[in-house]
Image (spheres, rainbow, N blue to C red):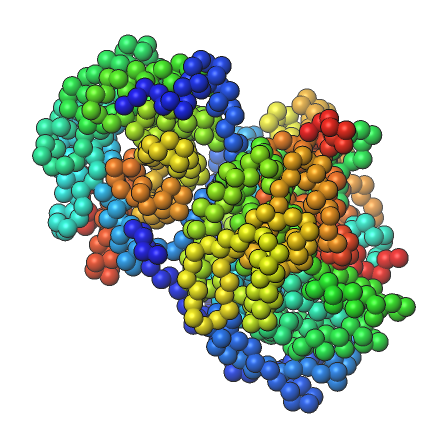
Amino acid sequence: MSDNRLSVFKTYKLYVGGKFPRSESGRVYEVTDSKGKWLANAPQSSRKDARDAVVAARKAFGGWSGATAYNRGQILYRVAEMLEGRREQFVREVAEAEGLSKSRAAAVVDAAVDRWVWYAGWTDKIAQVVGGANPVAGPFFNLSTPEPTGVVTVLAPQESSFLGLVSVVAPVIAAGNTVVVVASAKSPLPALSLGEVLATSDLPGGVVNVLSGKTAEIAAPLAAHQDVNGIDLTGADAALAKELEIAAADNLKRVSRPQPVDGDGDDWTADPGTHRLTAFLETKTVWHPTGALGASGSSY
Amino acid sequence: MASAFEYAPAPESRSVVDIAPSYGLFIDGEFTDAADGKVFKTVSPSSEEVLSEVARAGAEDVDRAVKAARRAFEKWSALPGSERAKYLFRIARIIQERSRELAVLETLDNGKPIKETRDADLPLVAAHFFYYAGWADKLDHAGYGPNPRPLGVAGQVIPWNFPLLMLAWKIAPALATGNTVVLKPAETTPLSALFFADICRQAGLPKGVVNILTGYGDAGQALVEHGDVNKVAFTGSTAVGKAIARQVAGTDKKVTLELGGKGANIVFDDAPIDQAVEGIVTGIFFNQGQVCCAGSRLLVQESVQDELLDALKRRLSTLRLGDPLDKNTDIGAINSSEQLARITALVETGEAEGAERWSAPCELPSAGYWFAPTLFTNVTQAHTIARDEIFGPVLSVLSFRTPDEAVAKANNSQYGLSAGIWTEKGSRILAVANKLRAGVVWANTFNKFDPTSPFGGYKESGFGREGGRHGLEAYLDVR
Amino acid sequence: MPTTLPAFADATASDSALRRFLHGLPGVDAVGLEARAAALGTRSIKTTAKAYAIDLAISMIDLTTLEGADTPGKVRALAAKAVNPDPTDRTTPRTAAVCVYPDMAATAAAALAGSGVKVASVATAFPAGRAALDVKLADVRDAVAAGADEIDMVIDRGAFLAGRYLKVYEEILAVKAECGDARLKVIFETGELSTYDNIRRASWLGMLAGADFIKTSTGKVAVNATPANTLLMLEAVRDFRAQTGVQIGVKPAGGIRTSKDAIKFLVLVNETAGEDWLDNHWFRFGASSLLNDLLMQRQKLSTGRYSGPDYVTVD
């Protein structure tokens, strides 16, 4: 391995339905590091790629939401195992993407892996925290349980290309939804590499689909898509977010608005709380009569 | 019994597990002899073969272990929850990797069929560590207020019926919440706990966080009585549980007890009969009936009693009793000669008191401790075998006429651990479940366990819950 | 053969009586049933037991071709395979039967003459069963006249799901009357009946109507025979014999592709209905590709080596 050895460039592809296609439009765009140096060409997704991603996410939803919470937790933990193994790769990609020092990038990647582990441990607990029996005033058993909403579009943060990405994607699938992720436009490479990790983590194809390209171009058809049930607008600027929220109203998608940006950006290291888990959970409440045992000979 | 389709022997190989001729106590990250050098043997109950010789902990060893746990507690409880979580996830993963080895080991030391250790015990053990690993960094969300703190050093004494699973039930929540532990496994089943100690080493768990003291009841007592233990967790007989409750009186020690039971399995006239039969069989013959929550009383509605008993006896005749390492064995060995003697004595009492005995026809091996699946009919609440826990493969069958009579009989016990309800009618399930004084109610199923599902008893079956969000409370300083 | 058993004359006296009877059967808990079937699937069948099971399974196959593209040549080739499944090992048992469409029954009969392998013909507008009764009965008559030893009929699922149980019952009686000496297998199409309660009811309805076999499915829909639905039907024939003394066979069909699957089914038979059913007079597999997998397993047992597709015939 000499210094003169020519490296093999990676061709970055989309991750849709468990496979790695190019954009159906055949377009790519240049991705540069924070200093303007060329890093790679990334697929420039079209609305048809978005459409295909939604089809894949819908196809995967039945199996993923129907899996036991334990099974989902195992798979999410496996993602963390795979990420840990690729630590060096992601440290380099994050450093290049965000212009961070190696040690800063390493801290970010470590936090991202730990974030996956955190969400892996939520799959079989969120129902215990937000669900439960309700003591209604009558002879009825009444139980509220959370259920995943369906197919969710997530606009990953523009700046935090890995930790922020993981922080918006993991909770949505931990809750049992399937996802179409729109990667950061300027720093899509860690997101596309994440697809490789997901593909080797026993995550069924279609549960997560990663698209790269111009945010507004891909987000618009997704926000309007009638078979998308929720949208996380984190990666949209204020003007775009408003437009998308309007489009989303057509089928009353569950909308998660971008968090206010303070100072030099969102703090993705803080405790995420549970709101990203509950944002795309529906609550189902079931009633069943219990009646009495019939001490006076009635009922049963 | 020669049949057309005779299943050939299908033995699971012992070669996957390497049992050393001797083991020490696991204190402060190292294996060490007992201070007075005492040892004892552990045998395989299916063959009476000696498996290994292990150290026998005395009071001095208990003291050393508690001190080690105390030293480790400072750092362990100060670790961010996310770091504790990752230790526990490592442990869970290693258990999964070594499941086959641990299943064979557990079958050898306990006597239960490999089918059960492989398909029930080990998956639950791993799942328990996975579940609680995930709570370690989410305690703020557990409903016990912000930043709940651990108690300190937990002294834990577990029984022989599900050795590694009971260890998981105790250690996983204790560690997740930031406590350190000293655990004493039962004297007839020390080995899986010692292998667990090795797994802790593989996982890089800091020294002293987990300490394993193999020994007899005296070591358990010394552990419970030790002044620097903050939390006592005991699973075992009601008699010992009561002694512990007396012992901790007036101290600051938090205690949880998971004790005996005499579970009522209630079958109504509209029960799905074939599945009810399976539920009865699982309820009392799973693990040879050596289960605290066993459905050891069958309460059958009189109008379907004959039909049900015919189906039950027919089903019992297909149970295969024999070598626990054979993958087709359904019924394994009784755990010890003492336990076999207890079962035998209670069965003799049953006969003496006039209940009618029926045993499944099976050949008992010449070596080892064996008891054929047995049921007693014409049992009433006044019979000893309807009240006392037998802890063996013996079912007492009683009848009832109406649902409220069933409930009254089911509740008519000093115990209150589990119950089963078999009926196709949803509202009856809920009405009956509402009235049953039992910590676990299974409807149209039995002996189902999950780390997310709280388990524990009413009345003399103990107090406190293990499993679920509820299982955290026992190990947190919440007043 | 009585048209109805005396003990159940009341139950089949009218549509409402039959409905009350069928709806009064014990319910089935789906989770419990599936768990029992899965638990029996963990039995470890090795060495001598495996050899016995493989040979028994081969002898229980109704080797089947039910394609629009069937030709006399195809049927003759299948028949030859049924009689001599493994040309490299003449100790291999024959299959129980060859199963074809009625217009191929004569070809099959000629090809199988004297071999002991039975001719089974589907009939009654198989697989959908959507035709007038006289058309369905003519279908049966033709098959019997052409030499069918066994008739695999389908029930009218539409009538069943609409609750018209007596209509379904009477159709089976009518078909049975056309069968003469031929044994009748009654197909429920378990995938379309959908619930286990329905499968239990259909089983009793079929047995009351005089079925010689109750059969899960046509093999032409997405979900066919499963361990759970077959277990349920085995419980039904067990209970029926206990109550009436009459023994009825069971045939799971479709979706049974591997030796492992087949052996699991035999374990179900062994531990539910019992060894009286471990005979091809009382238990069949409706299958085609299963045979080659059984042959390869048989070859492995006798040679010690894993076999491959080149060592079994394509038909």
Q: Please identify the quadrant where the C terminus of chain B is shown.
A: bottom right
Tell me if I can see residue C96 in this picture. yes
B191 lies above or below C224: below
Name the residue rendered at 31%, 47% in the picture.
C259
The image quarter in which residue B89 lies: bottom right
Q: Nearer the viewer, residue B159 or B378?
A: B378
Give the number of callouts. 0
B348 lies above or below B189: above
The image quarter in which residue B270 lies: top right
Name the residue rendered at 73%, 32% in the picture.
A293
C97 lies above or below A271: above
Left or right: where B420 falls relative to C114 = right
Residue C68 at x, y = what percent? 24, 23
Left or right: where B40 falls relative to C20 = right
Q: Nearer the viewer, residue B343 or C264?
A: B343
Q: Please identify the quadrant where the N terminus of chain B is shown.
A: bottom left
Tell me if I can see residue A95 in this picture. no
Residue B249 at x, y = what percent? 87, 67
- Residue lying at the far right of the rendered structure: B250
Residue B29 at x, y = what percent? 67, 78
The image quarter in which residue A46 lies: top right
B365 lies above or below C106: below
